Each structure stands twice: as structure tokens, then as C-alpha cells.
Amino acid sequence: MILPSIWLASASPRRHEMLKWIGLPFKIMAVNLDESLHPKENPTDYVKRLANEKALAASLKINPAALIIAADTTVVYRGEILGKPADKTDAFRIIQKIRSDFHQVITCLVLFNIREKTKKIEICTSLVKMRNYSDEEIQTYVQSGDPLDKAGAYAIQHPDFSPVVDFRGCFASVMGMPLCHLERNLRLYADYQPLAMHKICQKYLDYTCPIHERILNGENIG
């Protein structure tokens, strides 16, 4: 099976940037969806549905010789889904709520090969603990505008706010694109040249991943 042209079904600047890291050419087909939670929908089903809906919506606008990559990420705190904040006040509330505590970040990655009518779905769940930042630090971060387009109202990689004190899982997934999960699916194509994704994370995120080999070997972890 030959790797077709790649389309990223996302408006996220972070996902655009992360996909550029791997050096494969791709095009963007941004889609806008209603991201409202369905009644009795659990967090995993929620991100899975949205990622699938993004892939399907993009497929309707793209020629059949394409591989669509779509993803969705959500933050879960004590069973509550914390989506993108409505405004700066909401962002402050969310960041304050998760202070000094653990939460989950769940990302669903979908790879939809239109021609082959095949779909690969990856669910990546990471455990994150926030540090004991002050209300003043939250306010400064919120005023920067950075939290407003992010689930959970924060960026794990933000150099100034630096909100995370403990972490278990996939750093790239918390940013919105689980790169090793993507890599193990791209390796299914005969003409794909394998990449050392852990070295890419080390280069761009300054993060040494302890689980990349297990992910590439097929384990369904973080």
C-alpha cells in the first residue's frame, strides 16, 4: 500500500506546526464543527466522535487519493470535560480549578484513507499534574490570550507560565498530536521512510520520551 497525499483536517496552528516537524508534505483542510457534548457522552467517546467527524467532513471536500489526519483533544478533571474557554474569565476559572491537582488529557487520532476506505483510530490518554501557581500568574497568562483556543485553557509547552509539575504519558499528545501513534500507522505504508519520533520530540519539545518504543511496538499507552 502506497502512502497517498496527506491532508490535515484541523485549524489548529499547533497541529500544523507539529506535522511540519516530521517533514512530510501535507495540505490543510480546516473544518468547523459543533463541539457540544452529547447527553451522557463520556470523554473518550466525545473526542473519538469529534475526530471522526472532522475526518469525514474533510473527506467530502478532498479527492479520493488522500490520507486524512484528524485529531481532537479534551481535558478531563474529576469526570468533568474542560473544553476551550468561552472567554478570559472562563479561562481563569478553569486554570484555577485544576491548580495543584491531576487531570487527564485525552486525544483521539484518526487516519482515514479515502481510496482504501480504511480508518485507523488511536486513543491516547495522559495524566498531568499542575503546579501551585498563583492567581497573579494565572491572570498574567490569561491576559496573554494563549489559553483561549485550548482545551483546558493551557499549553503544556508554554515557556513562561510552565504550568505542569508532573506528567505521565505522551507529551506530544497533550499538545494535540500523538506523534509516535501517528508514526506507527504511517509505517503501514510500503513507501514510508520511518522516522525517530522521539528524537523529534527531543529536538522541538526538549522532552525525553520514556515510552516511545512501547508505543511503536503497538502498546495502547499514554
Image (tube, rainbow, N blue to C red):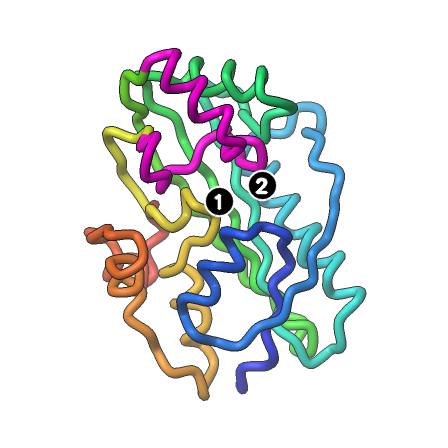
**Which residue is nearer to you in this view: 164 or 126?**
164
Q: In which quarter of the image is the C terminus?
A: top left
- The answer to which quarter of the image holds residue 50 is top right
Against 147, is 28 above or below? below
Residue 83 pos. (x, y %):
58, 29
The residues tagged by marks 1 and 2 sit, at their Cα atoms, a distance apart of: 7 Å
The number of discs equals 2
Helix, strand or loop under label 2: helix
Residue 217 visible within the image: no
Residue 174 percent across, percent down from the top left: 41, 42
What element does badge 1 sit on?
strand
Q: Name the foreground residue: 212 vs 44.
A: 212
What is the three-letter code of the residue carrying label 1?
Thr
Q: Which residue is drawn at 58% across and 50% down?
A: 12
Left or right position of 12 against 132? right
| Amino acid bearing label 2 | Val
Please tell me in which quadrant of the rendered image residue 127 appears.
top left
Check whether the beta carbons of the residues at disc 1 and disc 2 lie within 8 A of each other. yes
Please give the residue where the numbered disc 2 appears in the rendered image.
Answer: 47
- Please give the name of the residue rendered at 50% of the width and 35% of the height, measured from the top-left corner: 146
Mark 1 Cα shell of 10 Å, populated few (<14), some (14-19), many (≥20): many
Vertical order, 14 against 194 (above or below): above
| Residue 107, label in figure | 1
Using the image as rendered, state which of residue 14 and residue 2 is in the foreground.
14
| Residues rendered magenta in the picture | 134-162
Vertical position of residue 163 compared to residue 110: above or below: above
- Mark 2 closeness class: few <14, some 14–19, many ≥20 residues within 10 Å: many
Which residue: 53% across, 32% down? 145
Between discs 1 and 2, the one toward the N terminus: 2
The answer to if 208 sits in the magenta stretch is: no
